[in-house]
Image (cartoon, rainbow, N blue to C red):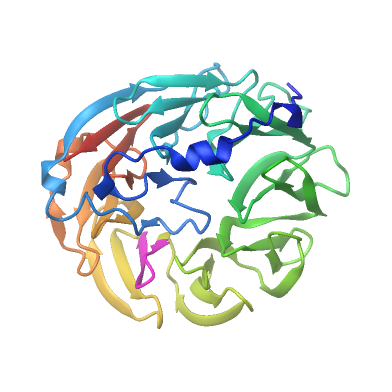
Amino acid sequence: MRLRNSLVAAGVLAGLLAAAAPSAAAGPDLWLQDGYGPGRTGYNPSESVINTGTVAKLKLRWTVKATLEPEGCEPKPQPPLVANGKMFLLNDGSISAYNNVNGKKLWTVGQAYFDGNRMTVAGGYVLGTEVNCFSQSDYSTNVVAINPNTGQLVWDEIQSYSITSSVADKGVFVVSGVCGICDDEEYGVTAFRISDGKRLWSRTNHILAGPVSANGRIVLRDTRHAQIQIVDIADGDVLGGAAAWQVAAANPAGTQFYLFNTAGIAAFDASAMKAKWTVRKESGALISDGKRVFVASANRINAYNATTGKLTWTRALADPRKLIRAGGLLYALSGKKLVILAPATGKTVVNGTAYGAVTDHVVATGGRLYTTSGSTVRAYTP
């Protein structure tokens, strides 16, 4: 499994970026990390085809059902990632690529077991993490880069921790995790250069405080102390610190982190970790489109002004979760029902019952809406 840089194919990045989008009007056909990009904003600013005027006209174009084997290692189904004509999906412990026009499978790769929580498209490659899911004592994880056009393994590096979180930005893939047999170094963070897999920096007894990068700044949590540090993703330099928080998302501009703890949520300046505003006793799934911060919890969705933290609207909704914002629409799940709202008011735009049961957030990009129901992905276009 240890294939190194000799497998690097010339033109991989150029081929990925040059691949044709579904139509000229659809905008970039990209959904590269869970939550859209490295900021985990939950907001795609480029989607324009699926909007208030077309969402009611969506029709099912194809369906893909992934296999969640091997038995005993079934991962939680994940929404797909998308990059210029291809959809990437966890399938049978492997990563598979599909043509996103017709749903036809293009390739599958995986001699071990991939964890879909850490699948990312960045730097022209599909990045994944492989684990030995049957072992009770081997905590090591393989970090791999895959050619998105062919499915060939480009580089493969092993890391001693069982990876639990990751983020990719500025040509760097950062992973963090835990090692139950590593004595005084139970936790760790490692940064890899995406182009060739070279290790750039590492930090023991730290983990990612959230799988989020704000314009190349990430937040680490010191596992020995109740503290967080803002760190440059390229070299690991510490840029600032604060008390204990977890990171939910960044804003699209990469100038703010949105943090949470048991006291509530807060917006922090991403360059200095200085609090801009706080909302006490607020919690839940959080995304931001730059103008507003949307929080789903306690049978309602609240929308806050992203600059001031002032509440702008509230929408009562049973069991709201899995928020996504794209094309002038706010998508949410209410139980397993898809709800489509106006982001400025929270009012219903169109009834989501036509999509049946939906179990994870939608992916809206390139003029397509992808829904996930268990291990089944469906693609809709107007």
Count of marks, rendered view? 0
Q: Is residue 70 visible?
A: yes
Residue 336 sits in which quadrant?
top left
On screen, residue 259 versus residue 381, left or right, reads right
* Nearer-the-camera pick, 76 or 98: 98
Q: Is residue 125 visible?
A: no
On screen, residue 338 versus residue 105, left or right, reads left
Residue 190 location, x and y as percent? 75, 49
Q: Quadrant of the C terminus?
A: top left
Which residue is the extreme one toward the right? 184
Q: Is residue 289 magenta?
A: yes
* Nearer-the-camera pick, 365 or 267: 365
**Magenta stretch, residue numbers:** 287-296
Above or below — where is 256 with respect to 131?
below
Q: Is residue 74 magenta?
A: no
* Nearer-the-camera pick, 256 or 300: 256
On screen, residue 318 versus residue 138, left or right, reads left
Identity of the residue drawn at 31% across and 44% down:
366
Identity of the residue drawn at 48% across and 45% down:
32
Residue 318 location, x and y as percent? 25, 53
Residue 327 sits in which quadrant?
bottom left
Above or below — where is 147 with respect to 231?
above
Residue 287 location, x and y as percent? 40, 61
Identity of the residue drawn at 51% across and 28% down:
149
Q: Chief secondary structure of the magenta span?
A: strand
Q: Quadrant of the N terminus?
A: top right
On screen, residue 202 versus residue 380, left or right, reads right
Above or below — where is 199 with respect to 284?
above
Residue 45 location, x and y as percent? 35, 59
